[in-house]
Image: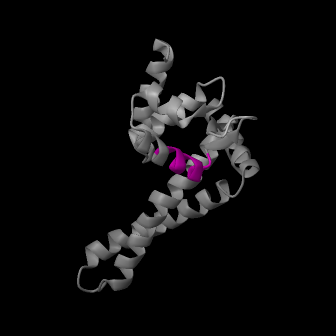
């Protein structure tokens, strides 16, 4: 059974996860593992969060793909257990990389395809707006690629930005 404070965190993390582009169940499992003292197996996770084993299993697979949880084995236990990435910075770094790949990259690609297929003379105002959007997104893409290149780079950029905010 999950304590009330932990339950509130799990539900809040579930809501926030939807904003990251992951489903609520996946985010709730992630929160459960963040707040677990020990590795948790599939049955424990599904029972504690009152969800089906099938849903929990699919979510665990996707969370492993994102890199924010790991599968571990306990000596003498044949069941797979799971733990959350213990480093909060690394966890957010991995989420940032995955979100860029799943959300930002396809949006930029879509704008570029539209520009390549469109007739700039036919819809001048629309083409101009799209070209401006493509330039902006390309600039952001360069910054994101540099920032998400590795964790050290991301930390360095974050420290620079913190300096601007502190002023």
Q: State the residue at coordinates (41%, 43%).
A: 55
Q: Is residue 12 in view from this perspective?
A: no
Name the residue nearer the viewer: 99 or 25: 25
- How many numbered marks have been drawn onto this rendered protein structure? 0
Q: State the residue at coordinates (47%, 59%).
A: 102
Reply above or below: 39 against 105: above
Image quadrant in which the C terminus is located:
top right
Residue 2 belongs to the span the image colors magenta: no
Specify the quadrant of the image occupied by residue 34.
Answer: top right
Left or right of 12 in this view: 144:
right
Residue 62 belongs to the span the image colors magenta: yes
Reply above or below: 50 against 145: above
Residue 3 place in picture, x, y as percent: 49, 13
Start-end of magenta stretch: 59-67
Q: State the residue at coordinates (66%, 26%).
A: 38
Name the residue nearer the viewer: 164 or 110: 110
């Amino acid at each position: 059974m999950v304590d009330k404070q932990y339950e509130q965190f799990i539900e809040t993390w579930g809501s926030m996860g939807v904003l990251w582009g992951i489903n609520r169940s996946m985010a709730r499992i992630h929160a459960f593992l963040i707040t677990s003292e020990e590795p948790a197996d599939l049955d424990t996770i599904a029972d504690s969060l009152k969800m089906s084993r099938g849903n929990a299993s699919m979510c665990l697979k996707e969370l492993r793909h994102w890199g924010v949880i790991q599968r571990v084995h306990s000596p003498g236990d044949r069941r797979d257990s799971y733990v959350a990435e213990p480093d909060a910075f690394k966890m957010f770094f991995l989420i940032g990389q995955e979100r860029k790949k799943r959300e930002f990259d396809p949006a930029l690609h879509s704008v570029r395809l539209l520009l390549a297929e469109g007739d700039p003379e036919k819809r001048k105002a629309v083409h101009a707006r799209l070209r401006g959007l493509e330039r902006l997104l390309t600039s952001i893409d360069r910054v994101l690629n540099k920032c998400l290149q590795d964790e050290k780079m991301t930390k360095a950029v974050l420290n620079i930005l913190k300096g601007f905010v502190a002023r």
